[in-house]
Image (cartoon, grey):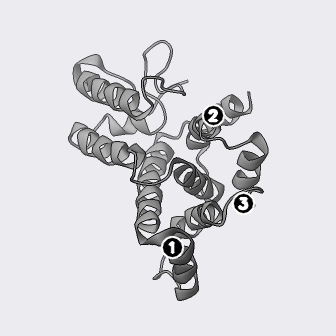
Amino acid sequence: MTHRFPYDETEHAASKQTIQDALTVMHQGDIPFQWIEEDGSSLLGCYASLSYNPAFVGQFFAMAKTLYAPGTVKPRNRELAILGLSSVLDVPYVTYCHRKIGSKCGLSQEQFEDALAGKVPADLSAEEEMAYRLGRILTDLKTPLDDDTWKEAVSVMGKSELVGIAHTVAGYRWVSLLDQINGDTQRWIKEDAE
């Protein structure tokens, strides 16, 4: 396979190191997904295209680490919002990565599959259901959030968690766009199924 964004050690080594360091921090030393080709020929998913503009790498991961920091957004809410986004967008690499992360947050295989299919998973709290629904709603939001959704979200999760979910969806919309321009999707459909 020819990569759209092949890895060049002389140009991308600093970006690669920043990515590795940030992923290690975000996942407490155990990165649960493949982010670089086994032969080192390319970074994968959003990381491949991200590395081609090093000025953004540090800022991208400053935001990413904030999304994963304790107290920013509850981990299950974060994952459910990302699953909501993934049910709307065609992002197999994001799905592949977050299947493992979602499992660490206690989401079952059935909950994960239901969420990807656009169905609110069973056995969630009202707050978790709202996080998932917001992931779907905010991914395609083109006008102000309607009052009914706003009131319901604030009543079940509060404004701080709602804003955290908004940052999560915005951040993963960025991740998804970088992944989509990379164009390497078919292999992740297969990888995710294994």
Residue to which mark 1 is pinned: 141
**Residue at position x 25%, y 45% from top?**
59
Total label count?
3
Residue to which mark 2 is pinned: 188
**Quadrant where the image shows the N terminus:** top right
Task: Provide residue 127's location: percent of width, then percent of height.
Answer: 60, 64
- Seen in the picture, residue 5 relative to 162 is either above or below; the reply is above
Work out whether mark 1 precedes mark 2 in sequence or the reverse, and give the earlier one: 1
Instruction: Indicate the secondary structure of the residue bearing disc 3.
Output: loop
Q: Is residue 52 left or right of residue 121?
A: left
CA–CA distance between discs 3 and 2? 19 Å
- Seen in the picture, residue 48 relative to 134 is either above or below; the reply is above
**Quadrant where the image shows the C terminus:** top right
Task: Provide residue 39's location: percent of width, then percent of height.
Answer: 48, 12
Amino acid type assigned to the residue bearing label 2 in the image: Trp
Amino acid type assigned to the residue bearing label 3 in the image: Gly
Amino acid type assigned to the residue bearing label 1 in the image: Leu
CA–CA distance between discs 3 and 1? 16 Å
- Seen in the picture, residue 60 relative to 165 is either above or below; the reply is above
Work out whether mark 3 precedes mark 1 in sequence or the reverse, and give the earlier one: 3
**Label 3, residues with CA under 10 Å away: few <14, some 14-19, many ≥20:** some
Residue to which mark 3 is pinned: 118
Q: Are marks 3 and 2 in contact (CB under 8 Å)?
A: no
Camera-nearest residue between 172 and 48 = 172
